Image (spheres, coloured by chain):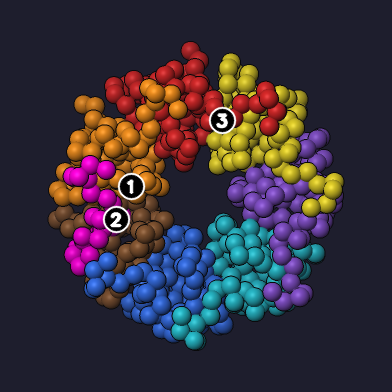
Chain colours: A orange, B brown, C blue, D cyan, E purple, F yellow, G red
Amino acid sequence: MSAAEILPLEIIDKTVGQPIWVMLTSHREFTGTLVGFDDFVNIVLEDVVEYDRDHEVKRHAGKMLLSGNNISMLVPGGKPE
Amino acid sequence: MSAAEILPLEIIDKTVGQPIWVMLTSHREFTGTLVGFDDFVNIVLEDVVEYDRDHEVKRHAGKMLLSGNNISMLVPGGKPE
Amino acid sequence: MSAAEILPLEIIDKTVGQPIWVMLTSHREFTGTLVGFDDFVNIVLEDVVEYDRDHEVKRHAGKMLLSGNNISMLVPGGKPE
Amino acid sequence: MSAAEILPLEIIDKTVGQPIWVMLTSHREFTGTLVGFDDFVNIVLEDVVEYDRDHEVKRHAGKMLLSGNNISMLVPGGKPE
Amino acid sequence: MSAAEILPLEIIDKTVGQPIWVMLTSHREFTGTLVGFDDFVNIVLEDVVEYDRDHEVKRHAGKMLLSGNNISMLVPGGKPE
Amino acid sequence: MSAAEILPLEIIDKTVGQPIWVMLTSHREFTGTLVGFDDFVNIVLEDVVEYDRDHEVKRHAGKMLLSGNNISMLVPGGKPE
Amino acid sequence: MSAAEILPLEIIDKTVGQPIWVMLTSHREFTGTLVGFDDFVNIVLEDVVEYDRDHEVKRHAGKMLLSGNNISMLVPGGKPE
């Protein structure tokens, strides 16, 4: 592993406490603050906004768990405006 | 793992005995009281209301087991009004 | 694990010999008496009624095995009238 | 495990040499004599009749192997008339 | 395991060097001579004829590897006329 | 294992440095020179031609990695004219 | 393993810090600089351009994680013009 390389789980770890944008295999998207995660890339978000094909559909207070086997994409820093 | 971080299974553990909202990969949704769970995120609910794309379709007395490999989202605290 | 918590396999174990309602990921449903199960949530039913989207389609005498990887929901006590 | 309980693999084992009805996740169905199986519920049938949504489509002499990951239902004793 | 029982992998092993008919989960079918296989039921065929829903579409000289996770059915002896 | 039998990974190993034809479960096809592979049947091709349902759509210089869990068919020697 | 052979993970390792083109099983495509990866072929990209069936849809600053179980193709060097 070259020194400059960053492991996927490291990226997620560095994003804890910060905004993140998550896309599921079903094209649903969620943005929120990353609160935690595990080795199966199950993740916990807080203050979540839910999108369906780019359109905001719902805001969720509190925490939300998204299951790793349905996640296809994670973007630290959140969804570009 | 940073101190502030919360593991997914911890979130579920803290929700035992409380309302939770569950979405399956097939877009069926269930709310109810979380009674138990295991490491595969199979979960047991009680006093369950079943929704199909946001519309209430059925109420189930007693307990219900939802299989982890079809769960895509869990929201402790239940479904927002 | 909090004392009040019930593990999914415990729920199934307590239902052996009693009615249970099973939904597959393909929306087929089965009710019957739970005769047995294993750690992969493969289950064995007896005196089975088969439904397709809520409509009764067939009655099966004898035993039936349903494979765990296609089960999405189990409800001890059977299907509400 | 309560004494009366029957494990799924036991049911299959007791059906070796007898008629069995198998449904795949793709709704294809097969009846035949169960000749063998393994822990992944791959099964071997003999003298097989193939159905597509309840209609007989083909008879196969000799043996047939059905792969466990596509099996959703097994009924010892065969398909009711 | 009762003496008369034949394990799935035994059936495949006994078919090496002989005709076999293979159906994938995508309804594509292949017949050919079974040249080899492994524990994941990946199989190697030779002199292959390819069918799409029962109609011959292509003949392949040489060898072909079919991946186990897409195979739903194997019939030693080949496809009935 | 009978002497004449060839294991799937052996077939792939013997094809390194030679043409190979790969079909994905999504019906996309690729031909190219096999450069490498691993036990999960992830494979590396070079000088790749991409087809969509038998029609050539793109040529790729350089190397390409195809993920094993989406491969359904491999034909050493390449795609018949 | 013949000397000339290159393992899939080696190809990815050699591409760290360079352009790469990634196709998901859902036909979404991404190009960007490969920043890291793990044994499950989860990969981290930077300065990402997103395509949907060959048409550019979005540019993402910062990093992006793509989950291995949805990746079907990786092309070191990026997407041909």
Give coordinates of residue G48: x percent, y percent.
Answer: 36, 22
What's the distance in space between the residues labelled 2 and 1, CA to CA? 9 Å
Chain identity of mark 1: A
Left or right: residue F4 compared with residue C66: right
Mark 2, residue position: B9
The chain ID associated with circle 2 is: B
Q: Are marks 3 and 1 in contact (CB under 8 Å)?
A: no
Classify residue G72 as left or right of residue E50.
left
Hey, which quadrant is residue D79 in on the image? bottom right
Does the segment drawn in magenta span residue B19? yes
Amino acid carrying label 1: it is Asp
Q: Are marks 2 and 1 in contact (CB under 8 Å)?
A: yes
Quadrant that contains the C terminus of chain F: top right
Disc 3 target residue? G8
Q: Quadrant of residue B57?
A: bottom left
Residue F26 in the image: x percent, y percent?
56, 38
The numbered dot on residue A38 is 1
C18 relative position to B57: left or right = right
Please give left or right for residue B60 compared with residue C12 in the image. Answer: left
Q: Amino acid at mark 3?
A: Pro
Label 2: few (<14), some (14–19) or many (≥20) C-alpha neighbours in 10 Å: many
Tell me the residue at 39%/80% (across/down).
C15
